[in-house]
Image: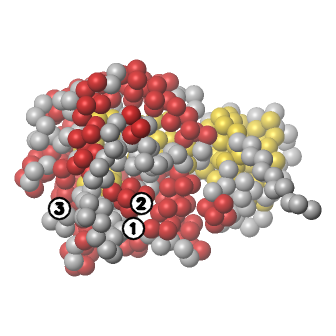
Amino acid sequence: MDLVIRKAQLRRTDGLRDIGIKGDRIAEIAPSIAARGTREIGADGRLVTPAFVNPHMHLDKCMVRDRMRPNATFSFDEAIELTWGFKRDRTVDDIRKTAVGVAEQAVANGTTHMRVFADVDTIGGLKPVKAMLAVREAMRDVLDIQVVAFPQEATVRNPGSDALLAEAMKLGADVVGGLPWYEHCDADSQTQIDLCFDLARKYGKPIHMLVDDTSDPTKRTLEMLALKTIRAGLGHHVAASHCESITFYDPTHAARVIAQVKEAGMSIVSNAHISLTLIGIVGRPQPAPRGITRVWEFLQAGVNVASGQDDVNDPYYPFGRCDQLEVGWVMAHTAQLVFADDIETAYDLITTNAAKVMSLTDYGLEVGRRADLIVLDAPSVKEAFRLQAPRLYVIRKGRVVAETNVTRTVHRAK
Ligand SMILES: [Zn+2]
């Protein structure tokens, strides 16, 4: 064996296991593995799980918040305007360098796969896409990146972005993005959705759209996307992020849309910390809307739901450490996933469910799968969340790609 992890606590498993890794694969999982590893890690009862997957991340905008004037209304519209000057002026090299620093943080925090959105519009042109494709290459030894060509200014609303989107796909983007709710009317939203499906078909790529990122109950782009997905038969190749309007629908309408999403076979990505802070601030009404989509109801309906970091220190969100354990912890609070099974589900949102969003067929803690694992300094998922436990070892393709050592001492008087 190249690497053996001893006495690991696995999820939903009684007793401890050794995990043997050969090359980039999990070769054996057993109560005791006789073979010695070239390298050995003693987990000593600590939790070992598949590594984190972040299915939604704007790596092209991260860390720019401190370089621009404040978002005075803390609104989506002002955030988008704030970014215009930056998009015009930033160089591919600047975007790439900043992104690499944050991507390395993600790896240190246990993420081995990330779906990265790159703005495509007539303001910044293809600079963000070129930068993110460069980051995909630069991070290849530690992180798998999928680049989404994302029309952040919408398409009908931003004439010329349709041609740029096609160009981005030609350059090698992995996913067709979309922002249909940001168009001026339903007809234009439908036009954008149709355009993105045409591109996806032409280039044989999946689709990930940001829909209904608002408390406006008249927005219906999740519904449009679900119906389009059903008719196109694209099922598991389609994901929708945010989906907040449905929370503000009447229950009958919401139930119909949830059923359509389930029938479509698409995934929902909800980033609770973003929805909590971006929805409902302008006049600060009380009680403040929680903003997130109907996570619990989607889960109950059997829809695949995942969570991502979305933003790190950009005009949309002031915080963020590219840490999926933090993302899942906030989701557990916001969606009230607090019973024992719920807490496990919250962990699924940042691991197995997120892997489904990215169509990672080689993912999971099973013999034969790629060895992308984390060793957490906690004995269980609940304790990992509670303590925001350090990721002592991050293993990707069988190689330790990050280690964390934390020493804390309390100096008592006597
Ligand atoms: Zn986003």
User: Which numbered disc, 1 or 3, marks the residue that appears first in the sequence?
Assistant: 3
Residue at (38, 62) in percent of width and height: 276
Taking the view exactly as shown, the residue that stands out farthest to the right is: 414
Identify the disc placed on residue 219. Answer: 3
Would you name the residue on which mark 2 appears?
A: 272
Q: How many marks?
A: 3
> Dots 1 and 2: beta carbons under 8 Å?
yes
Would you name the residue on which mark 1 appears?
A: 295
Q: Quadrant of residue 153 in the image?
A: top left
Front disc: 1 or 2: 2
Residue at disc 1, CB closer than 8 Å to ligand 1: no
Q: Quadrant of residue 325 in the image?
A: bottom right
For the C terminus, which image quadrant?
bottom right
User: Observer-nearest residue: 210 or 153?
Assistant: 153
User: Percent x, y for residue 134?
Assistant: 42, 23
Looking at numbered disc 1 in the image, what kind of residue is underneath it? Val
Count neighbours of disc 3 (C-alpha within 10 A) and say few if under 14, some if 14 to 19, many if 20 or more: many
User: Observer-nearest residue: 297 or 259?
Assistant: 297
Give left or right: position of 193 versus 134: left
